[in-house]
Image (cartoon, coloured by chain):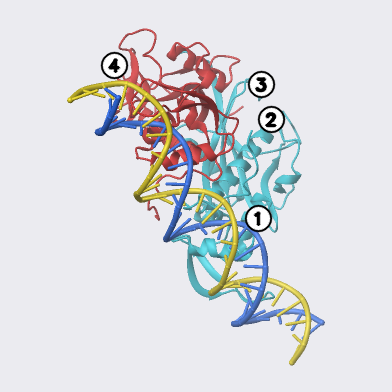
Chain colours: A red, B cyan, C blue, D yellow
DNA sequence: TCGCGGTAGTGTCAGCCTGACGAGAATTTC
DNA sequence: GAAATTCTCGTCAGGCTGACACTACCGCGA
């Protein structure tokens, strides 16, 4: 077999929505290279492990959530990255995965080595992680247009407003609440009403919904037709 | 550095439209494993080579087109595949790329070791190439919905009907020529009229167009809203 | 108790886009 | 020439969207 050999790792772009911000899970590196820099969580692929297995294992380890992340979360591959000089230690290929999680309390160990950072504030990541993050965020933005995956950012039961805030945070736009409500509630299989309502806050109580079986939006929920001719 | 080592290769899903069929470029394997089976063209990543470089190099080699494939073609990454048992020789990670080319004469060497096959007729490929092909075809179908990339299947100058046949072949549907023409000619930047016309065939001569600068379709050209709720 | 601000959800309406055609224009073939 | 074929423009009804008026229901404070 020809070809030189690579170390193969998996890097995770773990996104969640906290308040009005789209946030990414970053870890502070404790080893060279890029010691003390922030980077994406990740690890090497173990023998007899497939890429999604590695990603799921790392996700569980980093979020301290056991397999809980899979209950309402989502995990998909973004792409492979293998520029010859992306890792000074040698030839390393990294397969990036995108994970979407509901907002959760800060990571189990309340240390400063990992935490949520608004993606808009992120700068200077290790390796080519800035590029990977950008690709992951763009993927998430597109995914929200054509699928019902925004609900992956929400807890098992959520209101239409919760869901709208996800779109607004990921797209950094404002959406008319009335039109948004009409769209998502009229899409068959997107939301399953529970007939229960949240109370406590100001205003009329909002109905709680659960995720429905639908996975795709037809027609899509398009972002601003962003004048992009070139 | 932890982790075991992988050989890393690139596999190509090279698609074109011939007549009414979406076709894929396959090669007949001359070595074990899967000797004499059909498989996707590909090769290993050379030292100091990035993944897109390998893909472009292999594409040029396989189509015998030098760099001509890039003139009106398109090359994008699909995903990485690394199941532990996908290659009996050992741990091999393959990054798949999707290439879209205009129809061209059969490969330079008129041998039987490589050629175009209608994707609908393909069966029993080597390794996990059937899965990779399926993923590539699905990616192409989605891409046609949201981008202007169908023109990558066409020669530099083409008619609206040429373009429509691309959509029909990739989606395996029929599209109303009048509505299709309205859609593509009214999308700013999709088609640039040349004011020249093709002649020779039956019927009114069709105008020739060139690709415009637009890359995205707003709104998208949706396939059949395929009743898909689950 | 009674407004009052705030949020949830419904209703309306004009405009754009699409699917489903009709019909005319321009060419080859018979 | 007449027929067949293909390209192109028009028409029209229906669906979806953005914009926004309006009602329903809550907590809060006077």
Residue shown at the point (31%, 20%) measured from the top left: A34
The residue that label 4 is drawn on is A36
What is the C-alpha distance between the residues marked 2 and 3?
Answer: 9 Å
| Residue B189 found in image quarter | bottom left
Mark 2 residue element:
loop
The answer as to whether the residues below labels 4 and 3 share one chain is: no
* Depth check, front residue: A207 or B204: A207
| Residue A141 found in image quarter | top left
The answer as to whether the residues below labels 4 and 2 share one chain is: no
Q: Which of marks 4 and 1 is in front?
A: 1
Q: Would you place residue B219 above or below residue B54 in this image?
A: below
Q: Chain for mark 4?
A: A
Q: Which of marks 4 and 2 is in front?
A: 4
Crowd tier of the residue under label 3, counting other residues whose Cα lies within 10 Å: few below 14, some 14–19, many 20 or above: some
Residue B119's x, y, as percent? 70, 45
Mark 4 residue element:
loop
- The reply, left or right, for residue A37 in relation to residue A182 is left
Q: Chain for mark 1?
A: B
The residue that label 2 is drawn on is B127
Residue shown at the point (62%, 37%) measured from the top left: B135
The residue that label 1 is drawn on is B168
* Depth check, front residue: A77 or B42: A77
The quarter in which the N terminus of chain B is drawn is top left
């Amino acid at each position: 077999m020809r070809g030189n050999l690579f170390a193969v790792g998996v890097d995770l772009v773990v996104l969640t929505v906290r308040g009005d911000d789209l946030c990414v899970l970053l870890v502070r590196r404790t080893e060279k290279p890029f010691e003390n820099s922030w980077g994406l969580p990740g690890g090497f692929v173990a023998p007899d492990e497939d890429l999604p297995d590695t990603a799921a294992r790392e996700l569980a380890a980093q979020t301290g959530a056991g397999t809980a992340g899979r209950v309402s979360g989502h995990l998909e591959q973004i792409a492979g990255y293998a520029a010859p000089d992306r890792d000074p230690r040698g030839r390393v290929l990294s397969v990036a995965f995108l994970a979407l999680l509901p907002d959760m309390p800060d990571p189990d160990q309340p240390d400063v080595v990992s935490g949520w950072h608004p993606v808009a504030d992120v700068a200077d990541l290790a390796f080519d992680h800035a590029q990977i993050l950008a690709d992951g965020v763009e993927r998430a933005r597109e995914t929200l247009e054509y699928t019902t995956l925004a609900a992956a950012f929400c807890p098992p039961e959520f209101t239409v407003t919760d869901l709208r805030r996800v779109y607004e945070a990921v797209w950094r736009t404002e959406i008319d609440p009335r039109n948004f409500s009409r769209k998502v509630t009229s899409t068959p299989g997107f939301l399953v009403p529970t007939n229960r309502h949240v109370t406590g806050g100001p205003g009329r109580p909002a109905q709680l919904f659960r995720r429905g079986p639908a996975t795709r939006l037809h027609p899509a929920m398009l972002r601003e037709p962003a004048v992009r001719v070139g």
